[in-house]
Image (tube, rainbow, N blue to C red):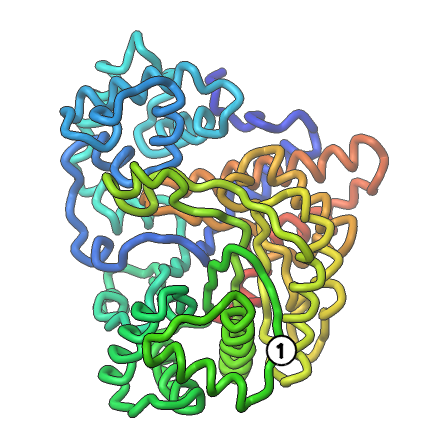
Amino acid sequence: MGFINDRFMIDSEVGVRLYKDVAAQLPIIDYHCHLDAKEIYENKNFDNITQLWLAGDHYKWRAMRANGIAEKYITGDASAEEKFKAYAETVEAAFGNPLYHWTHLELSQYFSCNEMLGSDNWQDIMRHCNSMISSEEFKPCSLITRSNVEVICTTDAPLDSLEYHRLLQQDPSFTTKVLPTFRPDDIFAEDASEFALFIDKLAQVTACDIGSFSDFTTAMAQRIDVFHEVGCRISDHGPVSVEYQPADAARVNALFTQKRNGTGLNEEETAQLNSAMFVMLGQEYKKRGWAMQIHFGAIRNNNSIMRKKLGINTGFDSITDQSNLAAGLNRLLNAMAQNNGLPKTILYNLNASYNDIVATTIANFQSGEDGVKSPMQFGSGWWFNDTRRGMENQLNSLADQGLLMHFVGMLTDSRSLVSYPRHDYFRRILCNLIGGWVDRGEVPDNKRILTRMVKNICHDNAVNYFRF
């Protein structure tokens, strides 16, 4: 029996049954990722396994640096062979790291390779993979179809033309839905000159004269409508921390005007304006039945030398902490609710020590008014938490404080076209967790309920929640 088999990551007999009979068969709803719609549409073959596997993957880059690999062999000008060899040597040292599992799930699923990658066989495995990679099966659209993906939600800036989403939707040969996600990080830029530049571009694209917060709201609503027309049903936000500082309309307008004119705000003023923008956006999302995602808790680009050399998103980010998180979360959601503008919301927490804070906060704002179960969601283990331990921690906190039955499940949060085995990884961990409850007599072995639970979490809840 190979390393990757039906029992991989599952030590419960009930868990094996749930995985084989239910979870493994279900399509994927990838409602948050960083794939490029243009890359999917152009549908070009990759040159080699190194380009497919290592280009842009900062998870792998971090591990390679920890293994003492020189940057030349990570992001530098080393050959594809040299970079693949360096990664193979790193995999050999990665027992206990989810990269070891993801690597072999990907080799098994896409390349039918069940050997363990290491320093002794990297050349054979590279030759094997490269012999397949020029085929039609390894073009982006084929990789997505082979992965059984029903829906992909990319991550897109408010001023994006969405040209390639439209083109993909006009292609009858590609049945996976590729939908945009509205990610307005630009409006939360701390630098006032960057903010002013974005507002100028927004005014140009929307043909709006933006001199006030009301004008800004009108222009943003126009862009939200454009996204909605192309099938967008989700927004996403990536604040470092979650805070709420109230301010009246006159104050908000004055702060907006000041920053719009390129004059910086202090910490309190920034929090007041950002809070008002969050509440305004929440109301716009709710009007259209969207879900709002908030990914918080990452402190980014911490190595200034490497940022200058390589840019952002290159593997120098980490988990951060926050004082008064519970108050910030509750006050923000409450302000939206008071404004009749609390949309369906998914909160993703990066600092696992706050899991119970998040799980108990969302319970304060659950409602049946939107016609979905658990409109407030505790998002899946994210980034540094999409490990076995991180996923189990999130699942247990959600089950402790809410209803795991209604969880919308896993996402890839990835830039890689071969990261879909992460859904399989999650499904194995989920089935093992539930199966363990049965084995220990904590829940009954009710096949109907257990089947529905796994099917809901892995697929059906996302379909019902997002309503693509």
Which residue was labeled with disc 1? 246
> Where on the picture, by quarter, is residue 126?
top left
Question: Would residue 290 be seen by someone viewing this image from the given angle?
Answer: no
Relative to residue 162, is residue 61 depicted above or below? Answer: above
Kindly give the residue lying farthest to the right in the view shown.
441
Q: Nearer the viewer, residue 160 or 424?
A: 160
Question: Would residue 319 be seen by someone viewing this image from the given angle?
Answer: yes
Say which residue appears at 54% left-offset and 78% top-offset. 276
Say which residue appears at 40% left-offset and 22% top-offset. 66
Q: Nearer the viewer, residue 223 or 218?
A: 218
Q: Amino acid at mark 1?
A: Pro
Kindly give the residue lying farthest to the top in the view shown.
120
Say which residue appears at 42% left-offset and 47% top-offset. 300
Relative to residue 292, is residue 22 depicted above or below? Answer: above
In the picture provided, is 21 more to the left or to the right than 273?
right
Q: Nearer the viewer, residue 346 or 429?
A: 346
In the picture provided, is 305 more to the left or to the right than 427?
left
Give neighbour class at mark 1: few <14, some 14-19, many 20+ (Cα, 10 Å): some
